[in-house]
Amino acid sequence: MQEIIKKFKIPLYGGNLNLIITSSIRESIESRKMDDSSIDDSTEAYVSEKFDQNGGHTIFVLFNSQSISFKKRFLTIDSIAHETKHAADFIYHHRGVSDGISNGSLNEHTAYLYGWILSSIFKVVEPIIYEDRLK
């Protein structure tokens, strides 16, 4: 199994965001002891979380390396946005933070968090897409 791993500290909320491009999402999940029997080798993306023994919180966003292709256009903005939503939900859930929509308040904090997660993902996938485009 081949992996590209980029780790980010989550601003304001604490914890870590680990972005992983992997040749096998299933193997990556199993190696981190985040068993999910619904995942197989055709899974294109996956988001999960894990707590360490000290209560540290890490969000894992995994993309199948076979899905990242400029020419094949497998990894779409839609799927990146979809996984961003899941990652933000994990961050909010364990910190008791509302996304702002449910209580009628402004949700600027959610917009900024989505933007940060999306920017982090693009820092990892954009060079891969660009390299593939030149092939």
Image: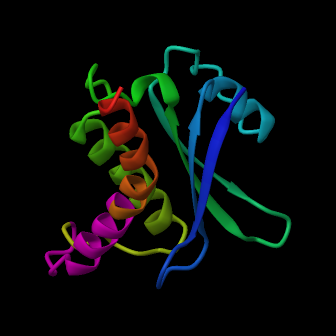
Residue at 16% across, 81% down: 105
Q: What stretch is highlighted in magenta?
A: 102-118
Query: Could you say where residue 85 lies in the image, as x and y percent from the top left?
Result: 33, 52
Whether 6 is among the magenta residues is no
Residue 63 in the image: above or below residue 85? above
Residue 4: which quarter of the image? top right
Residue at 36% across, 25% down: 135
Residue at 44% across, 68% down: 92
Q: Outermost residue toward the front?
A: 134
Query: Could you say where residue 32 lies in the image, as x and y percent from the top left?
Result: 77, 41
Residue 17: which quarter of the image? bottom right
- In this picture, residue 59 sits left or right of residue 30: left
In depth, the one of 51 and 124 nearer the eye is 124
In depth, the one of 48 and 125 nearer the eye is 125
Residue 99 in the image: above or below residue 51? below
- In this picture, residue 59 sits left or right of residue 2: left
Query: Could you say where residue 119 lies in the image, as x and y percent from the top left?
Result: 34, 63
Residue at 30% across, 37% down: 79
Residue 121: which quarter of the image? bottom left
Query: Could you say where residue 95 lies in the image, as x and y percent from the top left?
Result: 52, 74
Residue 61 in the image: above or below residue 104? above
- In this picture, residue 13 sits left or right of residue 117: right
Whether 107 is among the magenta residues is yes
Q: Outermost residue toward the bottom?
A: 12
Query: Would you say the magenta stretch is mainly helix, strand or loop?
Result: helix
